[in-house]
Amino acid sequence: MRTNIVIDDKLMTLALKSTGMKTKKEVVEEGLKTLIKIKNQSKLKALRGKLQWEGNIEKMRADK
């Protein structure tokens, strides 16, 4: 998808330097991937303690 956005120059420069990425496109795409991962992790954390698991962890660890 092609789009035009205004990005803070200092923020982009810092992102390029700190990641070692070569292009602005790489930085933006990595930022989007990271945002998605963080949001998905938050959704999983919200399920903590709400799901019931049945099984024998010791038996599972012994199976190879």
Image: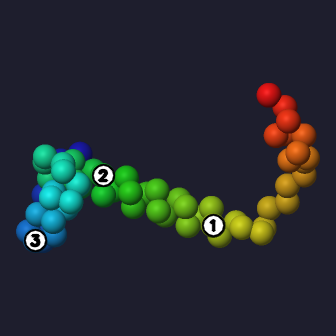
SS at mark 3?
A: helix
**Which residue corresponds to the image point at 86% horizontal and 47% vertical from the top-left?**
57
Q: Are marks 2 and 1 in contact (CB under 8 Å)?
A: no
State the residue at coordinates (71%, 67%).
48
Q: Position of residue 13 (x, y in %)?
A: 11, 63
Instruction: Please report the residue visible at 80 percent of the width from the left and 28 percent of the height from the top.
Output: 64
Q: To which residue does mark 1 refer? A: 45
Which label number is shown at residue 16? none
Tell me the amino acid under the disc marked 3.
Lys
Residue 46 % position (x, y) = 65, 70
In the picture of the structure, the residue carrying the numbered disc 2 is 30
Q: Left or right of 37: which side holds 56?
A: right
Q: Amino acid at mark 2?
A: Glu
Q: Position of residue 44 (x, y in %)?
A: 62, 61
Q: Amino acid at mark 1?
A: Lys
Q: CA distance from mark 2 to mark 1?
A: 22 Å
Up-down relation of residue 39 to residue 2 (above or below): below
Q: Residue at x 13, y 48 (%)?
A: 23
Q: Are marks 1 and 3 in contact (CB under 8 Å)?
A: no
User: Mark 1 or mark 3, which has the lower sequence index?
Assistant: 3
Q: Return the residue at label 3.
A: 10
Secondary structure type for disc 1: helix
